[in-house]
Image: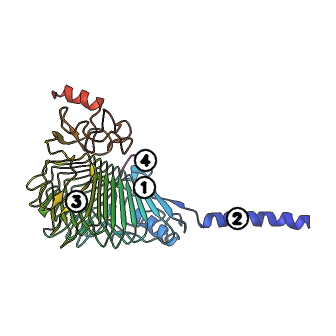
Amino acid sequence: MATARASLRPLAAALLLAVGRAGAAGIIDVNIGGDVHVSGRCTLREAIVASNTHATPADTNCWSGSDGGNTIVIPPAIAPIEVTGAPLDITDAGGETTIRSAVSGTRVEVRRVSGTGTVFTASRPVAFEDLSISGGQADMVGGGISVSASTATLTRCRVSGNHSDYAGGGILVSDGGTLTVSDSTIAGNSTGELGIGGGIASDDASTVVLANTTVSGNSSSDGGGLFMWKGHLSLANSTVSGNTAIRAGGGIATYALDTLDLVHSTVAANSASAGAGIRLYSGPALATAVTAFDSLLAGNIGSPDIEHTGSVDDIMTGDHNLIGSVGENVTVPPDTLACDPGLLPLADNGGPTATHALAGDSCARDAGGTIARSEFDQRGEGHPRLAGEAVDIGACELDAVDLDRLFANGFD
């Protein structure tokens, strides 16, 4: 009996190991930068197929993947990854697919270099880390990334130079999906002349969350930076700047949006004929629930910094905000400042994204609340959110390092 038990131990161990592996995430290494099959290698496209199917594609050395979600790793040395075929499609039903650079903090460029279509599409959960996604040319929606009825997370990414004819030049999230973007830049994307959401577009009650992120230099007919149709939009420690809309919402345009939350954020230097900073449209007898804390809407061009098209007022709640000009049908909290904040141009002021620094004598300086709602400002570690008696209004805190730089450049 003892011998029988001993002989069963290796089998039991093997079964336990197999059970442990069945639901575990796997690592799939990309080892060639092209989009064309090369015998015995693993392209990004083939790695995604392995992750989706949990099987090694024929004549490749891609790992087979796992049904517990997979991580696809791209070494910066083989970049750029050049997409020439159909969109890279994430469909793994087993768990979240992560596509990342092999070196944290070093972006790998994934760019479409020929043909038309989105760069990435996803109908299952996906996370992108340390990627630069560019060159997408979509006939309809989502030039760089199109996410449908699922979740997408971007961390330390750049989505730029993409185009769609209709919605979401950079990114589209639809059908109740959720997009979360942190420490990233969405810049220089566009739509066609009747399009919506140059940088990001959302429809069908989806959710978009931006943290420590800059949306800049995007263009569209409505919603140069972002366009939201129903659903929820949240910005924390983020900047929306220099976006252009032909019609409405240079920075942000919304239609029947449920909630808009702004915390320690800046919406500036955007342009449009209506609602240059933010344009809300809620339809008859409806309003969007807008909440703002320590946020700055100023210096937008061509129309008010915020306005609402509808038959009832949109009543903003919160405190310690600065809004340069308030348009029709918007009521702001009584402590809202209406002064020129003296924003400096969008620039590299430290951290992973561009920001608007404040001039040394800015009326936004120490004009926020006395309790910081985050440990650091948009730039991240090394830039404390509370550097004076109170927080500064907007995404970028004026700290000792910034003051030294301003004085060195001749500001006072």
Of marks 4 and 3, the one in the foreground: 3
Quick one: quadrant of the C terminus?
top left
Q: Residue 82, how many percent across, how many down? A: 32, 60
Q: Is residue 353 rendered to the left or right of residue 273?
A: right
Asked whether the residues under the numbered discs 4 and 1 touch, taking CB atoms below 8 Å apart as contact, a structural biologist would say: no
Determine the CA span between mark 1 and mark 3. 42 Å
N-terminal of the two: label 4 or label 3? 4
Of marks 1 and 3, the one in the foreground: 3
Q: Is residue 5 rendered to the left or right of residue 220?
A: right
Q: Is residue 220 rendered to the left or right of residue 77?
A: left
Q: The magenta stretch spans which residues?
A: 102-110
Q: Residue 88, how many percent across, how many down? A: 37, 67
Mark 4 = which residue?
Answer: 104
**Mark 2, secondary structure of its residue:** helix
Residue at 17% over, 32% down: 361
Amino acid type assigned to the residue bearing label 1 in the image: Arg
Q: Residue 256, how many percent across, how many down? A: 24, 70
